[in-house]
Image (spheres, rainbow, N blue to C red):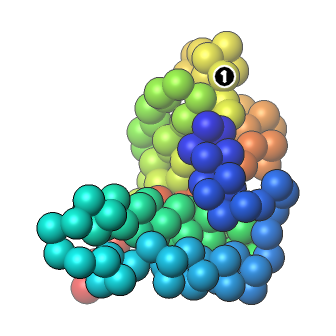
Amino acid sequence: MKRINEYKKLFGAEQDMSLKALKSSYRNLVKEWHPDKFQAGDEKAIEAELKSRQIIDAYHFLVSIAPETKAANLDDFNTTIATPIMDWQHKGLLLEVTFLDGNTYEFFGVNKALYIKFSQSDKQTRFGKRNIFNSFTYRKIKKSEVEA
């Protein structure tokens, strides 16, 4: 959640931004902080390099959790969460779940108590569907590999 709030603050968004507004804000920030805008060896050039990397990372992250992106990928998400869970790990408030079909999703804001219930459940997929998968902000981080 801290990462989401930090990135939204960078883009000046209080709530969910539309993809169009996000793209516009991204372009303006990149123009402002592009490293080629500053002289080589200048302190501002180094700062601009770091800031531009942060802006690019934030843009891709916010696009991946945008409502339009979620709506476009809802069928794939529903298909994936119906498959068995292969692996999971929890760090802070982040739960990373890898499904048997090869897709991996991050769920933000999952507290330790809920994670413990999830990991001790007889059927993680069923518990996840009821308590986690549709209740928390998520994003797809790894796509399934297609075998030839």
Residue 42 horizontal/vertical position (percent): 22, 66
Q: Is residue 38 visible?
A: yes
Residue 100, by quadrant, is: bottom left
Q: Residue at the left extreme?
A: 41
Q: Nearer the viewer, residue 101 or 16?
A: 16
Is residue 70 depicted above or below 87 in this figure? below
Q: Nearer the viewer, residue 40 or 58?
A: 40
Residue located 46% across and 36% down the image: 88
Residue 51 horizontal/vertical position (percent): 41, 61
In the rendered view of the protein, which quadrant contains the N terminus?
top right
Residue 5, by quadrant, is: top right
Q: Is residue 122 visible?
A: no
* Neighbour tally class for label 1: few under 14, some 14-19, many 20 plus, Cα within 10 Å: some
Question: Which residue is label 1 attached to?
Answer: 111
Is residue 91 depicted above or below 62 in this figure? above
Left or right: residue 81 versus residue 57 is right
Residue located 66% across and 64% down the image: 11
Left or right: residue 115 versus residue 55 is right
Amino acid beneath label 1: Asn
Residue located 79% across and 69% down the image: 17
Residue located 77% across and 61% down the image: 13
In the rendered view of the protein, which quadrant contains the C terminus?
bottom left
Q: Residue at the right extreme?
A: 15
Q: Secondary structure at mark 1?
A: loop
Residue 138 horizontal/vertical position (percent): 65, 52
Residue 144 horizontal/vertical position (percent): 41, 68
Left or right: residue 3 versus residue 16 is left
